[in-house]
Image: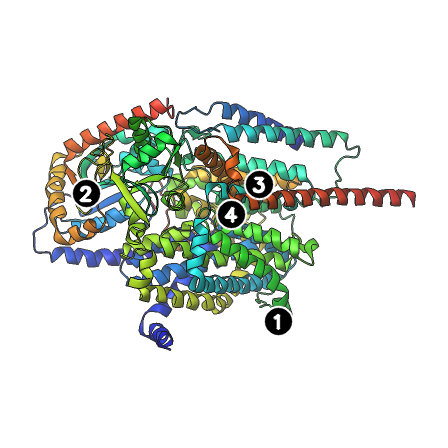
Amino acid sequence: METLSQVVSMLFGTPLIPAALIGLVWGVIGGAMPGLSASVTMALVLPFTYALDPMSAIVLLASVYIGAEYGGSIPAILIRTPGTNSAAATVIDGFELKKQGRAGEALGISLWSGVVGSLFGLAMLIVFTEPLSRFALAFKPMSYCALGVLGLSIIASLSGGSLLKGLAAALVGMMIATIGIDPLSGVNRFTFDLPDLLGGVKPIMVMIGLFAVAELMRQSGGVDLATQAATSVRIVFPSFPMMKRLAKPQGIGCGVGLVEGLLPGGGGSVAAFFSYNEAKRWSRHPEEFGKGSVEGVAAPEAANNTVASSSLIPLLSFGIPGSNSAAVLLGGLLIHGLIPGPRLFEQNGDVVMGLYVGSFVATLAQIPIGLLILPLCMWLVNRPRHVLAAFVFMLVLSGVYSINGSYLDIAMVMSFGLIGWLMLKNDYPFLPAVLGVVLGPIVESNYRRSLLLSGGEHSIFLEDPIAVGFLITAALFIGFSLYRERRDALARKKEKEVNANA
Amino acid sequence: MRKLAAALAFAVFGFGAGSASAEPAAYPHKVVTLVTHSSPGGGSDIFLREMVKHLGKYINATFIVENVSGGSGARAMSRLATSKPDGSVFYAITPTYIYTSLLSKPPHTYRDLQPLAIVFADPEVLYTRADGPYQSVKDLIDHARKARGRFGAANPASLERQAAERLKAVAKVNAAVVSHEGGGDLMINVLNGTLDAGVGEIQELRAQLAGKKVRLLGVFTEQRLADFPDLPTVKEQGFDVVVHKFRGLAGPKGLPADVIAVWEKALPQLLADPEYKKVYGQESLIVDFRGSAQATELVNGFATEAEAFLKEAGVIK
Amino acid sequence: MAGGAALLALAIVYLIGASNIPHSTLSDEVGARGMPYLLGVLLALVASGIIAKAAFASAPAQSSEEEDNASFSRVVGLLGCAALFIGVSWLAGYIAASAVTLFAVMVYEGGRPGLRTVAIAIGGALFFWLTFVLFLGVQQPVGKLFGG
């Protein structure tokens, strides 16, 4: 009862609601801009929070995070451009739905799934911070390496038919990720002495290039008229039967997002891909995935919004951010003299409470704000094709330049676009490449770290139960995929023979 | 909106500066831009923003913080090196700018800039988990003599790495020095016992120190820290390793003498300001003021040492 | 077939690049070259596999694939528009470059080069400047001639 009155006085006695709403809107806009990741969007607002009281500042930042994770899905669905890293998996089925004239439905599903994910993450944050933070500590370099291998093992099922082409794409993605300073020894790899390459190629650049620029190139000259199909600007919020159907992929997304959020390094994009793949595996309609599956939008969107809350668990409990965005939030806490850790809950209980309440407000506010913003976005993408193409092109150029202020980045994204166009032409799948860029460094650096720790003994992996569990699962996944590939190939052959005999 | 708010903040701030009791020193420019390579919320960004809040009391100008991120400082160096050396723009320097100059071939390097002053030193410490078996640097080294030691540093080819490698060399032990992707990553591996100890800045450890999760074993400075009087230096424990993570300002080459004089007078005053003292006191920063000539000497000495370290290790040719 | 050959070439170039990565005593058991070597060799194998598969498959890959992909010359044109943006923004700043690029892409994609298109380009440029520079406050190109 005391807590309840505290909540009520917070809601109406402090600037908590405005902070949550402003943060949410800012986050949605920033997240929707390609190139501006959730962490950058938060960093941009950080200087303003210096002047605010600690609670409003933290609520503002957390709300920006929630908004940005959601906002990234809007351009992913509408213009095939992931606004943030973690929206890359949403592109696949979201844009397919849009091409089928079901953009309103896709946006409604992503909105609803975002709310479900946020609510779940928030509940975990409030109730299970203590036990979950211990789980995060149990991850050693061996476990991370195995987690990366497990992630890579889904390449086979993301390859869409041609395993060899999928593998090639993944390898090229991992090659791109080796550019930059070597994470262990510090020597330069493939940097050609360019300072802009010291920090490596950001995954978002590969994603924007492969998805957005390649799509612009493919459509150039007005070959594709599908986008011109007159679509209504109405947002279709999922109906009750639809909600029931989405519950399973959302549950998968929430579970995966919870785990990934706890672990530094993974972040939203890994969670989104993983949950996409798992949703496909457990779906009753796996054949729809890649061709406009509603479940393929729900799972990654629930996952990345869960990460936005669950990555706060290690942050609040011992000051270790689970994602780049959580790191910015850490900066915000420190600026206001708040030191995360067990004592934060005792000494600044009101701030923590405010964070919970504010995040809750922001989560619920996603629905009205989304319903307000989305029709405008849909109107925008229904402009004549040449106008839309020009604006998307400019959006990509501006967004990419803003990351580092570098023309080299623009040149790189355009090259990735060209590569993507060639891949489209020759039926190479994109997803393995994106997965390779994200997971390659995780696998490599943690593998090397593990061997460094053991002095070159591989047995160190067997001493880590988490690593063993992941590696066994990965082996099962690969075996299963190969078996299915073989079975499908045989089935096709048989069918041919039957047809030939007939 | 951002620019607008910033302008508003400066207006308010300028007003505050005018009402300060001490007369601020005259300065040839109305607006002074302070550039940092860290993004908002990063180490140098916070350093500048806190400093700017109080600097107006001592120098009659408006100070703006500009974040020029990208290229690990290379872009910020170019921004400075191509500006006029008239005292209107400075760059917040840390060892990063020297490492970037040495590791890649940026269009402009630390040699193109002139250090204006060194203000602080960030102490680097050796730490272990609080429930671990090590009580001192000696325990740690003894363990590494018997078995394979496991030390951690936040980043490859950084000052932290340099400190860990030198400790290993001075103690003549066989230890793995594992570098990570930032301090958080490293912290987890120290806390879960994967590593025996890590090297980090004291600011990064505040959360864990407050929660009594980590134990400090030694500090890589010449003298003990004022706010950790019981913490012995690594050197007094018998391992002669001292590193100097400096924080200061640099301008384009050829700064006029009168500009340097204003700053050299104002910065010690700022450091003595009780309000500012309160801010940096919390951060365990060591006041280490050096004027332009001494700062240049320090930076050049640091660069020579770092270059030797990187060459010896084969990281650069 | 051509794709496989290109990948094989990439693998070889990458391996040559990997052999030039400096060796460091700070390195570990695997070393900075380990992963690049592995990736290069694997890609070479996969590429050979793709070539072999294409060579042995009697019928050429089905060309039933709907031909909705633009031609290479069109793609080069778009790359040219990006180059235009870089050139103009370097010279005259962000707003001018956005307007020119928007206009160029609209005309390139079949818009009529009339007053209406010019108006949309200028309005769009202002919109981008408002969003990115004034509202979000992120860095955008500053021109050599007359700044922002």
Q: Position of residue A166 (x, y in %)?
A: 63, 40
Which chain is disc 4 placed on?
Answer: A
Q: Which residue is mark 4?
A: A393
Quarter where residue B162 is shown: top left
Under circle 3, the secondary element is: helix
The amino acid type of the residue labelled 1 equals Phe
Mark 1 and mark 2 on one chain: no
Q: Which mark is residue A433?
A: 3
Chain identifier of the residue bearing label 3 in the image: A
Q: CA distance from mark 3 to mark 1?
A: 37 Å
B151 or B286: nearer the viewer = B151
Residue drawn at x 58%, y 41% is A420
Q: Earlier in the sequence, mark 3 or mark 1?
A: 1
Q: Position of residue A42 (x, y in %)?
A: 38, 54
Q: Are marks 4 and 3 in contact (CB under 8 Å)?
A: no
Residue behind mark 2: B225
Q: Quick check: A64 left or right of A168?
A: left
10 Å crowding of disc 3: few (<14), some (14-19), many (20+)? many
Residue B27's x, y, as percent? 13, 44
Q: In the picture, which quadrant includes the C terminus of chain B?
A: top left
- Confirm or deny contact between disc 3 and disc 1 (CB under 8 A): no
Separation (CA) of disc 2 from disc 3: 50 Å
Q: Quadrant of residue C60?
A: top right
Tell me the distance, in whole angstroms, between the alpha carbons under discs 1 and 4: 38 Å
Classify mark 4: helix, strand or loop. Answer: helix
User: What element does badge 1 sit on?
Assistant: helix
- N-terminal of the pair, mark 1 or mark 4, is 1
Closest to the observer, B102 or A392: B102
Amino acid of disc 4 = Phe
In front: A357, or B195? B195
Which residue is identified by label 1?
A240
